[in-house]
Amino acid sequence: MADFLSDEWFERTNDTLHAAGPVPFKEGLAVFRIVLEFPDAPSSGPHAMTFTLSPGEASVAAGDHLAADAIIRLSFADASALAAGTFDSATALRQGRIKVRGDINAIVPLLTWLQGAHPHAAD
C-alpha cells in the first residue's frame, strides 16, 4: 500500500477515481473543488490536497486551490485514517473533528461518493 500523500498514493487514487463512475452532481453545477487542509502535516509533504469534481470525472492533486468551493480542515492523522478506511467522514463530522467552510449540502453527497470510490473500498 502506498504511503498517504505520496506520488504513488495520488496516482493510485486518481486511477480509482477515474474508474469510479459518475460523480453525484447537482443539476447545473460544472465543477466543484474541495480542499482538504491538514495544518499539522509533516513538513516533508503537502499540507493540503484538492479534489476536483465534475459530472464526467474526478481527480485529486497535492496542494490547495484558490478557487475552492469548500475547504475542509482536519488533522493529518484523521485524514490518513479516512484515506485508509479506518475512520469515516460521517463520524468525523458528528464528532466535530472536521471543520467545513463552504456549502455543506453540496459536500456531504460528494464526500460519500469519494469515500465509496476510494481505493480502500476495493480491498
Image (cartoon, helix red, strand yellow):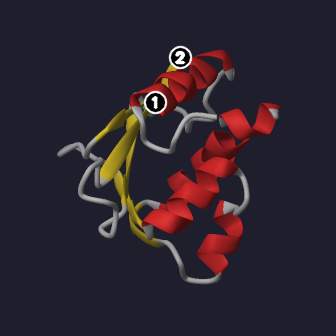
Relative to 15, is 33 above or below?
below
Image-based side of 53 in relation to 102, left or right: right
In the picture, the quarter occupied by the N terminus is: top right
| Mark 2 closeness class: few <14, some 14–19, many ≥20 residues within 10 Å | few
- Rendered image: mark on residue 10: 1
Residue at coordinates 65% horizontally, 22% vertically from top-left?
A: 22
In the visual, does 90 lie left or right of 62?
Answer: right
Residue that numbered label 2 is attached to = 56
**The residue under label 2 is which amino acid type?**
Gly
Residue 117 appearing in the image: no
Instruction: Name the residue nearer the viewer: 10 or 103.
Output: 10
How many numbered marks does the figure carry? 2
* Residue 48 appears in the rendering: yes
Q: For mark 2, give the secondary structure.
A: loop
Q: Residue at x 36, y 45 (%)?
A: 49
Residue 27 percent coordinates (x, y): 54, 33
Q: Measured from the top left, where is residue 89 in percent x and y?
A: 64, 62
* Placement of 69 over or under 9, stated as above or below: below
Q: Which quadrant would residue 118 be assigned to in this image?
A: top right
Disc nearest the viewer among 1 and 2:
1
Residue furthest left in the image: 66
Question: Mark 1 packing: few (<14 Cα in 10 Å), some, or many (20+)?
Answer: some
Q: CA distance from mark 1 to mark 2?
A: 19 Å
> Left of 94 or right of it: where is 31?
left
Identity of the residue drawn at 69% across and 67% down: 90
Farthest bottom residue in view: 95
| 49 vs 42: above or below | above
* Percent of width and height locating residue 120: 73, 39
